Amino acid sequence: MAAIHPKGAVKDEVVTYFFLIRHTEKGTVQSAAQKKKGVNDVTKVVKKEGGQCNLYSTRGAPFDYVSVMTGITTAAAVRIAAEIETRGTVKATLISGIEIMAARVISGTSA
């Protein structure tokens, strides 16, 4: 039986997962090498789950990093959040969303 979608609904909408990440006390004293290893370990898990991720450093925000992940299931997002927190160096808040509008910039103008 085919799935029924409301009029105007998009089939198989892509869910994007935003991980808002903050250092714990333990995480603030990590070396650069330890931080890099943690990032690489999480990236491997994301790829194993079939997803992609981008990590952004923030300044002046309540979070130290924002990681944006696509191509994963909700269950995978929960597993990844657990992996992010496993070392005790960061806490992650997971938010999911669907894109409602995309802005494209072409030759310095919005399209």
Image: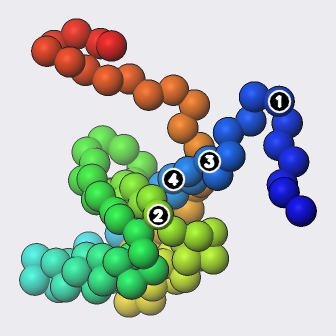
Under circle 1, the secondary element is loop
Q: Is residue 44 above or below residue 71?
A: below
Give the labeled residue for mark 2.
71
Note whether residue 22 is visible: no
Task: Estimate the spatial distance between the alpha carbons at disc 2 and disc 3, rounded to whole Å.
Answer: 11 Å
Three-letter amino acid code at disc 3? Answer: Glu
Look at the numbered discs 4 and 2 and tell me whether their residues touch, using CB distance below 8 Å.
Answer: no
Q: Quadrant of residue 9?
A: top right
Q: Earlier in the sequence, mark 1 or mark 3?
A: 1
Task: Estimate the spatial distance between the alpha carbons at disc 2 and disc 1, rounded to whole Å.
Answer: 25 Å
Q: Is residue 6 above or below residue 40?
A: above
Residue 90 on image: x %, y %: 39, 75
Residue sitting at x 25%, y 45%: 59
Q: Residues within 10 Å of mark 2 (few under 14, many from 20)?
A: some
Look at the numbered discs 3 and 4 and tell me whether their residues touch, using CB distance below 8 Å.
Answer: no
Three-letter amino acid code at disc 4? Answer: Thr
Question: Looking at the rendering, in which quadrant would you find the C terminus?
Answer: top left
Give the labeled residue for mark 3.
13
